[in-house]
């Protein structure tokens, strides 16, 4: 047994943890000894040093050495039993509610010397302790410092403390996995000692080298895996793609805008990858509406020019349709584009499958079905995945494998997140970022309104519609736990229908796919003016004609989410509005958030503020998405440690150090299974 294996053993291997206790822990997702180590002290009680009775402080928990003098057991029921005790400075009374005589005689025998600890009271000129819980004839068995954990239901404090102490006492000394330099930065504290300090109750809310070391380990293990995946993929030698971007230059004339500096830079970075011998594994990051599509199309055209096939995967059918229409409009006629979705008829599907196999399709656009089915591309050279920020490392790796050795990968994400998060979530990829949005963009004017002013909003909406504009109207789910609760949106829909001569549509989670598509198309074709929906409005879809978004109960959303919703409008050249509705007066915190949102249209800045206010886990549902989250590392608070870990991983890469040394770290931090998939 390697020495870290104790930490990975099942929780029921701990002395004192039986089947029942193990079950309680497992309910809380504490499965191994290691897991238990992250259940941290919440608070502690300092019982202080031994005191004399005349030094006691009322209201504090204190410990005294006393002699048992006299019992007072009243014969009347409901009156407490009392025990008078003394030391050489005074007297103290122990008061017992609900304890039997026999028990009291046993724990406090007459004339014995006993240590006792509890909260000191003072009544009728005498010190007292009511229901003392810590009584012993041995000072050492009453710990000066008592740790309090957030208890797992069904486990009492004493037992919990005992279990944790048992584990802390058994932690093995592990071979150091950090380099000397890094260890030095944390004052050379070992992992074991750091964990023990982490559990020292006096360190609750205190941070120091021990804490930083543990945070670093967590980040480091994540980055090591990312680096390993990146390098495995990059080691794949592929055939260089050869092109002059002729076709792309041709279509540049068909679009009515100039590319931005950031778009051009991204295109160049991608082209360099395509032309190189290393397989591309790149993330294209850019806020909603920053113009990622055209960058993707440029790379698709270049790969086609170099005589390879390409695949473009969208998260929804409607988005796939939109991409399809766009390529039909701007691609030269000789480029063979097809679309494949779950709705594609059998006959057509079969044809497409055939044509893929003999390379008579250049670009296939579709949804997830592009990779679930038995599609055999004759010569696949590029996969582009649109808006897939919820893809985990493992899934991306699989995708890359599926494409084959000559297949480059481009992933696009519209989730503006701080750099530390990009390093964490997309650290296995190279990154191109479109920071600045196209210049012609008008700022979206963001306003807030109380719900009882809805008449003003209706008036405003009528004016907008009269000018030929369209409106998104978002109603959040009332009760997040009951996802079927669409009452608010349905009610609002009925209300708006009356006010806007029926030219209103509704979308919510209960509406089936086909109906949904029909409604979205009606909106796209201006058959309806207002689209009421819960937050399910398609990610990334381009409705240039909609210039107003009204968001009800806006305090239900996080900043980033509001920003993403707001990004649905302001894509055309019209003045755009985002109206945030509130039920009642805003709390200070809500006001702060609205201010940030109004002041900035920069998704990166907003997401950073959002993380500061809410913690990174809540950011755009990363927690729910099943992406590994950290136990103690925080991308905002520990930015310096993220950067340090990045530097260290780069150093290891450059030295070509073997990953073997880090195996215990990776195993403990639950990353090693990803590694196994790689080999
Ligand atoms: P996203 O990054 O969210 O996918 P899109 O690629 O859908 O954004 O682009 C949003 C809109 O901006 C589209 O209507 C697109 O035609 C337009 N657009 C893209 N690049 C530019 C540019 N450089 N100048 C002006 N408009 C642009
Ligand atoms: Mg897009």
Image: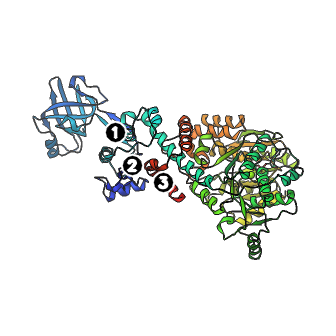
> Is 449 situated above or below 339?
above
Q: Which residue is mark 3?
A: 672
Please give left or right for residue 532 compared with residue 78 in the image: right
Sooner in the amino-acid sequence: mark 2 or mark 1: 2
Sooner in the amino-acid sequence: mark 3 or mark 2: 2
Residue furthest to the bottom in view is 347
Alpha carbons under labels 3 and 1: distance apart: 33 Å
Circle 3 packing at 10 Å, graded few (<14), some (14-19), many (20+), is: some
Q: Which residue is mark 2?
A: 36
Q: Position of residue 427 (x, y in %)?
A: 60, 47
Please give left or right for residue 480 compared with residue 447 in the image: left
Q: Quadrant of the N terminus?
A: bottom left
> Is 401 situated above or below 63?
below
Between 225 and 89, which is closer to the camera in this rendering?
A: 225
Q: Which residue is mark 1?
A: 147
Please give left or right for residue 386 compared with residue 525 in the image: left
Alpha carbons under labels 2 and 1: distance apart: 15 Å
Q: Residue at x 42, y 35 (%)?
A: 210
Please give left or right for residue 401 compared with residue 187 in the image: right
Identify the image quadrant of residue 135: top left
Is disc 3 placed on a helix, strand or loop?
helix
Q: Residue at x 69, y 69 (%)?
A: 375
Q: Position of residue 242 (x, y in %)?
A: 78, 55
Sooner in the amino-acid sequence: mark 3 or mark 1: 1
> Is 298 situated above or below 56?
below
Circle 1 packing at 10 Å, graded few (<14), some (14-19), many (20+), is: many
């Amino acid at each position: 047994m390697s020495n870290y294996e104790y930490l990975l053993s099942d929780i029921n291997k701990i002395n004192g943890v039986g089947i029942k206790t193990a079950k309680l822990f497992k309910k809380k997702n504490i499965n191994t000894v290691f897991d238990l180590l992250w259940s941290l002290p919440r608070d502690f009680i300092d019982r202080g040093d031994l005191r004399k009775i005349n030094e006691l402080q009322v209201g504090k928990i204190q410990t005294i050495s006393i002699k048992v003098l006299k019992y007072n057991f009243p014969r009347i029921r409901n009156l407490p039993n009392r025990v008078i005790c003394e030391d050489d400075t005074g007297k103290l009374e122990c008061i017992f509610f609900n304890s039997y005589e026999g028990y009291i005689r046993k724990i406090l025998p007459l004339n014995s010397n006993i240590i006792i600890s509890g909260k000191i009271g003072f009544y009728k000129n005498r010190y007292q302790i009511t229901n003392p819980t810590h009584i012993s004839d041995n000072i050492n068995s009453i710990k000066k410092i008592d740790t309090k954990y957030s208890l797992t239901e069904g486990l009492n404090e004493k037992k919990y403390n005992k279990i944790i102490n048992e584990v802390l006492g058994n932690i093995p000394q592990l071979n150091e996995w950090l380099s000397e330099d890094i260890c030095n930065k944390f004052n050379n504290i070992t992992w074991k000692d750091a964990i023990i300090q982490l559990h020292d109750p006096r360190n609750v809310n205190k941070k120091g080298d021990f804490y930083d070391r543990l945070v670093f380990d967590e980040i480091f293990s994540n980055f090591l895996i990312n680096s390993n995946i990146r390098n495995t993929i990059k080691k794949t030698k592929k055939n260089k793609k050869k092109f002059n971007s002729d076709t792309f230059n041709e279509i540049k004339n068909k679009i009515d805008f100039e590319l931005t500096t950031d778009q051009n830079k991204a295109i160049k970075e991608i082209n360099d990858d395509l032309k190189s011998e290393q397989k591309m594994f790149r993330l294209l990051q850019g806020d909603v509406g920053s113009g990622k599509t055209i960058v993707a199309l440029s790379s698709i055209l270049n790969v086609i020019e170099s005589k390879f096939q390409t695949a473009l995967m969208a998260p929804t059918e409607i988005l796939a349709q939109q991409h399809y229409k766009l390529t039909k409009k701007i691609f030269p006629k000789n480029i063979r584009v097809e679309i494949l979705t779950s709705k594609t008829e059998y006959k057509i599907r079969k044809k497409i499958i055939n044509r893929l196999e003999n390379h008579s399709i250049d670009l296939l656009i579709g949804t997830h079905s592009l990779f679930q089915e038995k599609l055999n591309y004759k010569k696949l050279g590029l996969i582009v995945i649109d808006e897939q920020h919820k893809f985990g490392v493992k899934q991306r790796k699989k995708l890359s494998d599926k494409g084959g050795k000559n297949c480059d990968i481009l992933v696009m994400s519209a989730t503006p997140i701080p750099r530390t998060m990009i390093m964490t979530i997309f650290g296995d990829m190279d990154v191109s970022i479109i920071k600045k949005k196209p210049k012609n963009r008008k700022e979206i004017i963001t306003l807030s309104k109380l719900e009882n002013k809805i008449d003003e909003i209706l008036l405003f909406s009528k004016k907008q519609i009269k000018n030929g504009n369209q409106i998104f109207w978002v109603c959040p789910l009332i009760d997040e736990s009951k996802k079927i609760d669409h009452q608010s949106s349905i009610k609002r829909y009925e209300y708006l229908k009356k006010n806007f001569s029926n030219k209103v549509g509704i979308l919510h989670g209960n509406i089936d796919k086909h109906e949904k598509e029909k409604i979205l198309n009606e909106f796209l074709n201006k058959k309806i003016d207002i689209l009421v929906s819960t937050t399910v409005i398609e990610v990334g879809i381009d409705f240039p004609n909609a210039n107003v978004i009204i968001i009800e109960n806006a305090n239900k959303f996080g900043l980033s989410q509001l920003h993403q919703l707001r990004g649905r409008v302001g894509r055309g050249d019209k003045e755009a509005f985002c109206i945030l509705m509130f039920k009642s007066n805003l709390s200070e915190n809500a006001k702060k958030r609205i201010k940030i949102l109004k002041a900035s249209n920069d998704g990166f800045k907003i997401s950073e503020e959002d993380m500061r206010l809410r913690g990174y886990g809540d950011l755009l549902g990363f927690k729910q998405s099943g992406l590994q989250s950290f136990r103690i590392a925080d991308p905002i608070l520990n930015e310096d440690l993220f950067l340090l870990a990045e530097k260290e991983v780069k150093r290891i890469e450059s030295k070509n150090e073997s990953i073997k040394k880090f195996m215990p770290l990776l195993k403990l931090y639950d990353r090693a299974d990803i590694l196994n998939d790689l080999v």
